[in-house]
Amino acid sequence: MTENVPEVTHGIAEYAVKADVSAAPPDVLDLARRTLVDTVGISIAARGEEAVQILQRTPGTAPGAGTSTVLPTGARADAPTAALINGTAAHALDYDDVTEQIYGHPSVVLWPAILAAGEQAGAGGRDLLDAYLIGFDVVTALAEGFALREHYGRGWHSTATLGVVAGAAAVSRLLGSDVEQTRSALGLAATMAGGSRQNFGTMTKPLHAGLAARDAVLAASLAAGGFTADPQQLESPLGYFNLYGDRTRLGGVLAALEQPWALQRHGINVKKYPACYNTQRTADATLRLVEREQLDPAEVRRIRVTLEPGGMDPLIHHRPASGLQGKFSGEYVAAAAVLDRSLGLRTFTDESVTRPEARDLVERAELTESATPPVGAPEWEYSYAVVEVETVGRGTLSERADVPRGDHRAPLTRDELEAKFRDAVDFSSTGWDADELLTRLWNIDTTSPFGGLVSV
C-alpha cells in the first residue's frame, strides 16, 4: 500500500493469536460465563421458532453428520451448520445481550461460532472462554473504525457486519492458527459481511446472526487449511472499512486493542424482556407506572412514548401484525405492559400481538423522539424513555427510565439470570434439566475437552 494507513488486518490477527488472556481477572471471566449462560438459554428457548425449524429441515442447512451440538434440539451437525442454526436461534427471540459499543449483539455471533468450532476441535472449556474474550475485544475495537450511527442508519445490521470478522478472529484463536492464517480468515470474513435492517421483524433478522456465526467458522477453517485472502483487506481502499466503516478512524482500532478486558471496560447489557433493546426502557417505565398507579387498561385514553434521538431507528413496526414485529414496536411493548402487567416470552406470540385489546391500545399509542426528555432532568446518558399515559379521570401519568434492568450499570443478579434461563428452557418444552445445564455452564472452564452441552 502506498498510503500511510495503519495495518489493521495484521494488528488484529497478531492480537488474536498472541494476546495473553490467561490472567483474565475473575470478574471478567464471570462476565464471559454470564454471556454464555444467557446465550445458551435463549438458543434453547427458540426450539419452536419457525425460522429455526425451517433451517433444520432444509437441505444444506439441516443437521446431519458432525460433532457439534445444535442447541435447540440436541442434534449434531458439522461446525458451520451448527453455528448457523445456533446463531439464528440465539437471535430469534430478540432476547440476547447488547453492547452500545457495536450498536448490536455480540454474543449471538461469538458464542455459536466458538461453541461449534470448539466442540469439533475438542478444545477445552477455558479455551472457549478465552476465545470469547478475544472476540469481544476485537468486535469493540472494530467499532472504533466505524461511524456506527451512520452505518446503522444506512441499513446495515452491525451485529453481523462487525460480528463475522470478530468471530473469525475468535475461532482462529481457538483453532491455533498463526498470524498469516488469521489475516486470511479476517479477509475472508470481511468479504462475507452483510445484513440489511429492512428485514427486521422477519425471520431474516436472526438469520443475520446465524450467517455471521457460520461464516466466521467457515472463514477461520478455510484459512487454517491454507485458503488465502488479501493480507491487508480490512484497511485497503477497496476493503472492509472503506465499504462499511470510516478509514480515517483506523488508528482507534489498534489503540483499542492496547487496552485490556473490553468486556470489563464496556460491560454487557442482558435483556430482561424478549424484545429489541430499544424497548427495554419503555418496558421498565411502563411497568413501574402500572404498578405504582395500579393502572387499569380501561382508564387509558392515549399512550405517548418519547425516546432519545435515534431511539426509534430499530422500532420500525408501529402497528405490528405478528409476534416478530411486536418485538420492534415501542407502541406494542407499552400497550402489552399496560394490559398484562408483565412482559415475557409469551407476550410476543402472534396470538398476543394480534388480540383485539392489544390492537386497540396500540392504535392509541404514539412513539416520538426528543433531545430533551419531557419529564425529569434534561441530561441523559446513552438513551432514555418517558412514558406518558393520558387517563380518564386522573389526568396524565408519567414515568421515565434511563437505565433498564439488565444494563451493565444495573445488572441482573445471578438469581435473576438463572430464572431467565429456567424460563427459557421451560418455554422450549424440551424437558431438559435446567439445573444440570446451569452447573455445566457455570463450570465450563473446568471442562476439557469440551463435549457439548445438551444431548437427546
Image (cartoon, rainbow, N blue to C red):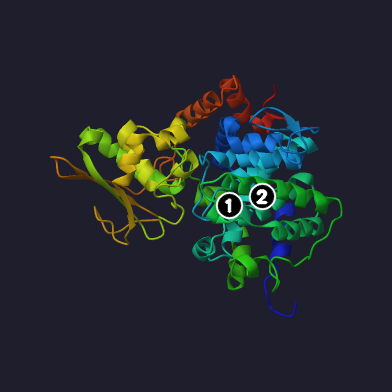
Q: Residue 212's mark?
A: 2
Element on which disc 2 rests: helix
Q: Is residue 22 visible?
A: no
Judge the density around disc 1: few (<14), some (14-19), many (≥20) Cα neighbours within 10 Å. many
Q: CA distance from mark 1 to mark 2?
A: 8 Å
Element on which disc 1 rests: helix
Judge the density around disc 2: few (<14), some (14-19), many (≥20) Cα neighbours within 10 Å. many
Mark 1, residue position: 159
The residue nearer to you, when weighing 250 against 64, is 64
Rendered location of residue 360, percent (x, y): 31, 40
Rendered location of residue 258, percent (x, y): 62, 60
From this view, report whether residue 361 is shown above or below residue 141. above
Q: Are marks 1 and 2 in contact (CB under 8 Å)?
A: yes
The three-letter code of the residue at mark 2 reads Ala
The three-letter code of the residue at mark 1 reads Thr
Rendered location of residue 106, percent (x, y): 58, 48
